[in-house]
């Protein structure tokens, strides 16, 4: 989709949908929102809907950063303590590594 051919109202509507979609545990939509609408929000000459798009892009970036930080923290903790957690960690694992921890 070429954003230059889309009216500004549609851009705002699409940006808002991606922003709200990220709250459905789909942080990839926030990434798409930031990448896709960054130029519209911060580079293009000012227009009426731009301030709202800018807000959605900033919030999407913040949500994405928080999601990445939380996921990285969880992965680090899980990898570090998996062997100590024993059977509980095995139930949480998708694959069970073989060998001595």
Image: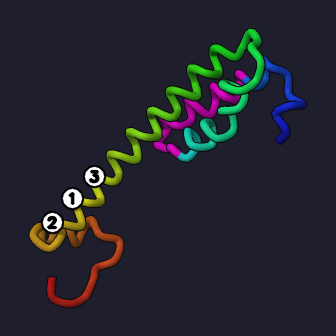
Cα separation, mark 2 vs mark 1, equals 6 Å
Are discs 3 and 1 less than 8 Å apart at CB?
Answer: yes
Query: Which SS class for mark 3?
Result: helix
Label 2 with label 1: CB-CB less than 8 Å: yes
Q: Label 1 belongs to which residue?
A: 77
Residue drawn at x 57%, y 43% is 31
Towards the viewer: 92 or 31: 31
Q: Which mark is residue 81?
A: 2
Tell which residue pokes out farthest to the bottom in this image: 99
Neighbour tally class for label 3: few under 14, some 14-19, many 20 plus, Cα within 10 Å: few
Q: Secondary structure at mark 2?
A: helix
- Per the image, the residue denoted by label 3 is 73
Q: Viewer-proximal residue, 31 or 41?
A: 41
Circle 2 Cα neighbour tier, 10 Å, few/some/many (<14 / 14–19 / ≥20): few
Disc 1, SS:
helix
Magenta segment boundaries in residue numbering: 12-27
């Amino acid at each position: 989709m070429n954003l230059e051919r889309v009216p500004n109202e549609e851009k705002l509507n699409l940006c808002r949908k991606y922003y709200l979609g990220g709250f459905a545990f789909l942080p990839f939509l926030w990434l798409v929102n930031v990448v896709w609408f960054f130029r519209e929000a911060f580079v293009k000459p000012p227009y009426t809907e731009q301030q709202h798009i800018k807000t959605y892009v900033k919030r999407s970036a913040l949500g994405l950063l928080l999601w990445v930080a939380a996921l990285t923290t969880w992965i680090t903790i899980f990898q570090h303590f998996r062997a100590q957690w024993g059977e509980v960690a095995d139930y949480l694992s998708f694959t069970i590594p073989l060998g001595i921890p």
